[in-house]
Amino acid sequence: MSTFYFFLQGIPESMGIIAISLAVARVPFRWGYILLGGVLLDIVSYIIRSLPVTFGFHLPIMIFLFFIGLVRLTNVTASKAIIAVLTGFFALALLEYCLSNAFFAYTHMDFEQAYANQSLWAAVGVVQALILNVIALVISNFLKPGGGAWKI
């Protein structure tokens, strides 16, 4: 996938992971920090994916970095932070699985055909990212954030 399409879908997707994790940890949203975190996580992911390492190696690195960031920048305990971070990544994995299967069933395409059409595949990723962010807003409405959760 080209760099443009990678970041087009990756930044909102990373923002969705961060937003879901913050909602689960009951930390109020600060969209500027969420955007910055999404950009940073996506840059790290891009760099790791560009290296000659095993596919999927970027995932534990991103989970660890986001965990460290959540613990350092908020008043969330480490145990609550790991649950929140893993929930965010699990939500992404589940949504990606469901959306891609629905997309393949609807279009009768296989993975290779869809991935070859970069703009179409990025559009599916953007829809997925939007759904992630909406889910985060819904979770935040049910799990009301508390005050004083941010250290900065």
Image (tube, rainbow, N blue to C red):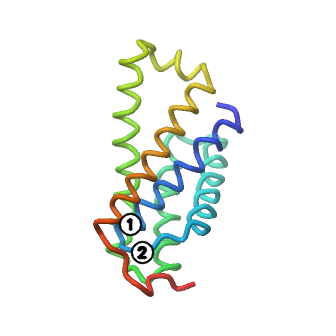
Residue found at x 45% / y 14%: 109
**Where residue 120 appears, x then y in whole percent?**
57, 25
Label ID, residue 27: 2
Residue found at x 56% / y 64%: 34
Horizontal side of 57 relative to 22 (left or right) equals right
Quadrant holding the N terminus: top right
- Determine crowd level at label 2: few under 14, some 14-19, many 20+ residues with C-alpha closer than 10 A: many
Residue found at x 66% / y 53%: 43
- Determine crowd level at label 1: few under 14, some 14-19, many 20+ residues with C-alpha closer than 10 A: many
* Location of residue 53 by image quarter: top right
Question: Is 130 rendered above or below residue 139?
Answer: above
Identified by mark 1, the residue type is Ala
Residue at the limit of the structure toward the left, as seen here: 142
Q: Secondary structure at mark 2?
A: loop
Residue found at x 37% / y 53%: 135
Q: Give the number of callouts.
A: 2
Q: Are marks 2 and 1 in contact (CB under 8 Å)?
A: yes
**Where residue 150 appears, x then y in whole percent?**
49, 82
Residue assigned mark 1: 23
Horizontal side of 33 relative to 137 (left or right) equals right
**Where residue 104 appears, x then y in whole percent?**
40, 20
**Where residue 146 appears, x then y in whole percent?**
37, 81
Q: Secondary structure at mark 1?
A: helix
Horizontal side of 127 relative to 41 (left or right) equals left
Identified by mark 2, the residue type is Val
Q: 6 or 128: which is nearer to us?
A: 128
